[in-house]
Amino acid sequence: MTTVRPFLMFQDGNAQAALDFYFATFPDSRMVQIERYTQDEPAPAGTIKVATFTLCGREFMCSDSPIKHNFSFTPANSIFVEFDSASELERVFILLSARGQVLMPLDNYGFSQRFGWVTDQFGVSWQLNLAAQAQG
């Protein structure tokens, strides 16, 4: 079987903090499997070598890169989250944008009555949208 999953590569040992934050922010989110670096491996012991996790029931993977790269996350790749509730959309927008950056504030952009785009404190980009049936 062929499987496709988004993969988030964190730097500076931030993967666990990001996962803790995402698990507290999104419903139906949990760790599926995790492997950590041990002593004498190329990254600090205890950081994430590879993890599989779910956000809102969707499977992702992540790691802490043992190599310092000249690149990180970019808004050109983002996670699109659709909400059934305007209040839940606003709650998550506030949490993700705190210590992050608002790329598009929550507003009516024509294609959606309630949409926002943020980069969180870890550099991950999120498009947050109110589902069409919830806009009605």
Image: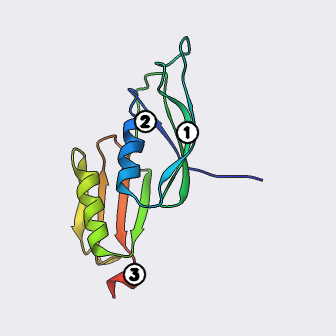
Residue designated by label 2: 15
Residue shown at 39% from the left, 81% from the top = 132
Q: Nearer the viewer, mark 1 or mark 3?
A: 1
Distance between the Cα atoms at labels 2 and 3?
33 Å
Mark 1 in CB contact with mark 2 (< 8 angstroms): yes
Residue 61: percent from the left, percent from the top? 55, 44
Q: Circle 1 sits in a helix, a strand or a loop, which is it? A: strand
Tell me the crowding category of disc 2: few under 14, some 14 to 19, or many 20 or more residues within 10 angstroms, Cα based: many
Residue designated by label 1: 51
Please say whether residue 21 is visible from this viewpoint. yes
Residue shown at 43% from the left, 56% from the top = 79
Residue designated by label 3: 132
Q: Nearer the viewer, residue 118 or 57?
A: 57
| Residue 130 higher or lower than 58, as above or below | below
Q: Circle 3 sits in a helix, a strand or a loop, which is it? A: helix
| Residue 52 higher or lower than 54, as above or below | above
Residue 88: percent from the left, percent from the top? 31, 68
| Furthest-right residue in this view | 1
Of pointers 1 and 3, the one earlier in the residue sequence: 1
Distance between the Cα atoms at labels 1 and 3?
33 Å
Of pointers 1 and 2, the one earlier in the residue sequence: 2
Q: Nearer the viewer, residue 57 or 67?
A: 57
